[in-house]
Image (cartoon, helix red, strand yellow):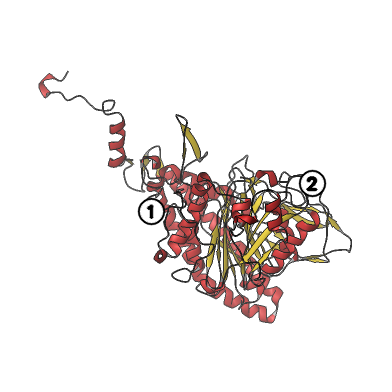
Amino acid sequence: MKLRILLVLIIVASASLTAIPTVQSCTSILISKGASADGSVMITYSADSGGSLAHLFHLPAADHEVGELVDPLNWEQRYSGCKVKQVAHTYSVFNLMNEHQLTIGETTFGGREELHNEHVGLNYAELISLALQRFKTAREAVLGMADLVREYGYSDGGETFSVADKNEVWMMEIIGKGPDQKGAVWVACRIPDGYMSAHANLSRISNFPQDDSDNWLFAPDVIDLAVEMGYYDPASGKPFSFRMAYDPPNPYSMRVCAARVWSVYRRSAPSLSFSDDYHRGVEGSQDYPLFIKPDNKLTVQDAMGLMRDHFEGTPYDMTLGLDAGPFASPYRFRDLKWKVDEAEYCWERPISTQQAGFVMVSQCRDWLPDPIGGIYWYTPDDCYTTSFQPFYAGISRVPRSYTLGDIERFSWDSAWWVFNFVSNRVYNCYSRIMPEVAEVQKEVEDALFAMQPAVESTALQLHKQDPELAKKYLTTYCVSSAEGLVERWRELGEDILTKHNDGFVRDPGVKSVGVEYPDAWLRRVISENPDQFKLPEWEEDTAP
C-alpha cells in the first residue's frame, strides 16, 4: 500500500503546494461534536511513513491573478503535469488544518489495482492541499475534491479521507476508474452527531442510502462502474456495497487493518463487546459498524490515548510472548507478513508503530474564533514514545526544529531526530526504559493542558482588541513551548543513554548493576535448548 505524508513546502507559479513522499499504512479516528466531552470535532491521523522524515510547515493566505495556473509537484518531487486553475484567494494552512479549522487526514486502502491510475490528474495529497487552501467546511471540501477529480482526473489508488470542520466530520472514500481514465468514483458519509468512527487502510463504507443527501454524498456513476467492471450484479438481489465492489477484504487486510478499528471500538465502547472474529478472518463473521456511540464522551486526551495502542489487555497484547523479546517490546519490524516452511504468518499490526512519521489530533471548536478554536496537537514520530504539542490555527510560523532534518543524517537540531533518538532507545529495551519516557511524557502533556485555559483566555481578550495581536501571541506561545519540549526530549535522550548503557543501569551516586533477564524469558530459552546453557553438577570433592 502506498501512502504519503505532507512534508515540504513547494512554491510553484506563485501558489504553494506540498510534495508528499511514499509512506506506509496509516490510522485515523473521527469523533463528532456530540461524541466529544467539550463539544469539539476531532480527527486523529498517524502518518505511518517508514523511511520518511516529516517537517511542519505554514502556508500563508494569498490572493491570485485570474487565469493563474498551479502545476503541483507529485510525491516523487516531479511535476505532475496537471495544471489546475487557481482561485482568487487561498486560505492559510498549517500542515493539515486551515485558518477556518477545516482539517483533513487519510489512510490508503489501495483497492482494485486495475483501477489505479498514475498518469492522469491529481493524487490524493494534491487533493488535500488544494482543499485546505480553497474550502471552509467539511461538506464543501468533500464536494470540492469530487469536482477537482471530475475536472482534472485522479491519479492514485483507493483513499479514505477524514474531513472535519467545527460542526461536522465526514468520511470520504475514493478510487480511480482505471489507467488513463479521467475522474473517480466515490462515496462520503457524515458521521452522525454523538458517534465516532475509524479507518485503517481498508475501505469502511459498505451499503449506503441513495436518498439522504444531508448525510450521504456519492458519485453518480459509483454503481454503474462496478456493474461495468463486473464487481456488482444488480440481479443478485444484494444491496450495493462500495467496499465489496472496490476493496474486497482478504485475511491479510482484515488482520492488519480491521484489527486497528476493532481496538479503537473495543476501548471506546467496551459495553458493546465487539468480537475479534472479523479481524481474525473467521468465516461468516460480521464487519464492525461504520460508526458507533462511545460509552462516554471523549476528551482530547482520550483521543491521544486511543492512538497509543499495542492491543494491551487483549489476547493480542504485543508486550507478551516470545515475540516481545526479553524486555516486552510491542514493536515488530517489517515485513509484517513472512513465511516459514511455505506457511504464511503475520505479525500483529497495532495503531502505535515505529514507522510513524508524525501523529496529529485535531480539535475544531465552534465557540471560539477560528484562530483560537482550531488546535492541531502534533508530534513527530511514534506518539507512544513522544509528546504532543499544541499548535493553534491562527499561528503564522512554526518552530525551527520542527522544520529541520534529513533522513540521511542525524541532527540534534531536528525535532524529528530528537524524538527518534529516544524512541529507538526504547524499542528493544521497552520494559526497562518506557516507564521513564512515560513519566516525562505525562509531565509535559499535563503541563500543556494545565496552561491551555490561561493561554486561550489571554488570546481571546487580545482577539477582542486586535485579532492580529492574538495571532502573534499564540504564535509566540506555540513556538516557544514546542522548542522547550524538544529541549526536554534532548535531555531525556541524554539521560537514558547515560543511565542505560552497555547492559548496565547507572543511577547517580549508586553502583552500576547489570540488567537481569526476566525469569519467564529465561525459561523459554531453556525450553528451546535445555542443555546448552546448563552447568554440570559436581560434588565439591571432585571439582578440578
Residue 467 higher or lower than 31, as above or below: below
Q: Earlier in the sequence, mark 2 or mark 1?
A: 2
Secondary structure state at the residue bearing disc 1 = loop
Query: Which of the 4 quarters of the picture holds residue 458?
Result: bottom right
Name which residue type carries label 1.
Answer: Thr
On the picture, is 55 further left or further right than 80? left
Q: What residue is shown at x 80% (from left), y 55% (from top)?
A: 152
Q: What residue is shown at x 44% (from left), y 51% (from top)?
A: 310
Residue 235 higher or lower than 320, as above or below: below
> Can you tell which of label 2 and label 1 is closer to the viewer?
1
Q: Report the front residue among 36 and 216.
A: 216
Any mark on residue 79, and which? Answer: 2
Q: Report the front residue among 322 and 345.
A: 345
- How packed mark 2 is, by other alpha carbons closer than 10 Å (few <14, some 14-19, many 20 or more), is some
Residue 476 higher or lower than 523, as above or below: below
Estimate the x, y position of residue 410 in percent, counting from the top left.
59, 42
Any mark on residue 314, and which? Answer: 1
State the CA–CA distance, disc 2 to disc 1.
47 Å
Estimate the x, y position of residue 42 in percent, counting from the top left.
57, 67
- The image shows a total of numbered marks equal to 2
Can I make out residue 385 in this image? no
Q: What residue is shown at x 61% (from left), y 40% (from top)?
A: 409
Any mark on residue 95, and which? Answer: none
Secondary structure state at the residue bearing disc 2 = loop
- How packed mark 1 is, by other alpha carbons closer than 10 Å (few <14, some 14-19, many 20 or more), is few
Estimate the x, y position of residue 339 in percent, counting from the top left.
48, 33
Q: Quadrant of the C terminus?
A: top left
